[in-house]
Amino acid sequence: MCVGRGGHLNVRELPLLIRQALSTFFKSRGLERVPADVLLLYLPEPSLRGFFVHQWFPVGSMHGNSSAVAHLVEHLAFEAARRKDRLFDHESANAFTSYLWTRFDVAVDAANLGSAFAFLSRLRAPFDIEMALFERQRDIILQEIMERERPSSAAVHLRGFDQRFFCGTPFEDWPIGSSDSVSRLSLSEASNFHSHYQTCRRLVVATGPADYRDVIAVAKRHNPNIDTRLLPSGGEAVPTRQTDSFEPFPPTALNLDISPGSDFISLAVHDEQTVLPRLIYRALWSLPGEGTDHLTLRNILGEFIASRIPGSLALELFEAGSVVQYDSSTELIGGGKLLVTVEVVIRDESKAEATVRFIQDYLRMVSETGLDDEAFTRLQRRQIGQLAARSQDPCAAAVHLGTETILFGYLAASTQKKRVEEMKLAGFHRLSKAMSFPLREGALIFAP
């Protein structure tokens, strides 16, 4: 079954294709249908409103086949590990990987080369897939690219990516944008590369004519020794492509990838073409050695910020008005520190003070739990409603600094008057449609 057309996939086909692949795979393991929680978490309806959204905003050429499937498998793995589920143990992971490669003809070109390599690398990491299988699929991809692409173009890409993904050594040249401006990373891919391969010592920017110098200045201010390098874009905006009913991601988006050694990660969106005038979300990342909070980092960069569905939570919350900034330093699991600076645009200026107060109370509550997930969940259920009520503000923000979710929530004033059960149902559906990563009820914010 070939799902690619020149390396690209119609976004409307993806949920059905993944559903079919999962269904066949689960049936091969004695299950008649895909478990309901898998479909709810990873294949939200009606189309891509949720888990896969961030994979499909069209920056340059679309990245998709391999990367989206890799994300599915990776999240299934983490979810299975969380539930101590043996469905995706070592043996079945290898079987699933082989199945995907035989059923999905991943047509790779220069634009999604990074996606394909990341697919293999991320599959190998959580499951310890046999090296022979890993290398065999890598060789297939390399050969296909060498046959498809101009030798000089392919060589540039292969040298950079091969060194990064398979040798484990710091790379000198990052080839994004070096071939016809088609190889820029998506936000999610950039953050995934950071999460799994932390050898980079540069600030990598692949962008059109945005106010990226502001971000560089912020990075320099936090770390004067940071090595910044702007990749060539020819002074032109990153090509965008309208895809079905989804808005193109702003061509002025920044794609950043920075190592913990440089202690800075930044994302800036300056979008003058939509109702989102300005949103900057910054995080200082300082974890010793191998990072322990990859999903948190990825959710910050790739999934929340990239929710660009019309009528989404982001557009509703960050429409116009005053800017509220709050800094909080919170200890992370593993002894690291995450300094979160939030600059949010709030429509009603009268809500600003209450919102900051809510964030302060919430982060203080998170810090007091010691970030133990079980304790946090218990405390969250008991106190989150009290915090929202005390803030007297329908605009609520929360940061769950565990290993799964970073969530910004918005509750309309009318919603607070509903019964808790109605709120939970309405809030879950609303946020599931608005956010670009899967939500569970335990992660939501409810006022009493």
Image: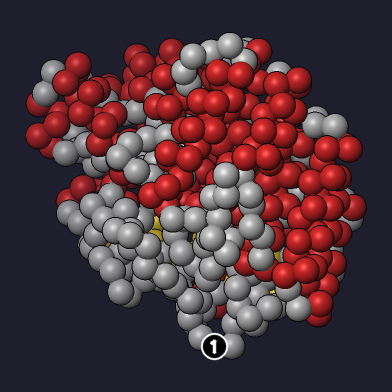
Q: In the rendering, at what x and y percent does residue 91 appear?
A: 76, 20
| Residue 327 coordinates in the image, percent (x, y) | 47, 49
Q: Image point 38% across, 45% down: which residue?
A: 48
Q: Residue at x 66, y 65 (%)?
A: 109
Q: Is residue 395 above or below residue 316?
A: above
- Which of these two is toward me, 333 or 57? 57
Residue at (79% x, 46% y) in the render? 137
Which residue is found at the position 48% from the left and 40% from the top?
Answer: 17
As drawn, is 359 to the left or to the right of 221? left
**In the rendered view of the protein, which quadrant contains the C terminus?**
top left
Q: Which residue is mark 1?
A: 235
Q: In which quadrant of the rendered view does residue 447 lie? A: top left
Q: Secondary structure at mark 1?
A: loop
Which amino acid type corresponds to the residue marked 1 in the rendered image? Answer: Gly
For the image, the number of numbered tags is: 1
- In the picture, measured across the screen, residue 198 lies left or right of residue 392, that is right
Quadrant holding the N terminus: top right
Tell me residue 49's x, y (percent): 35, 43
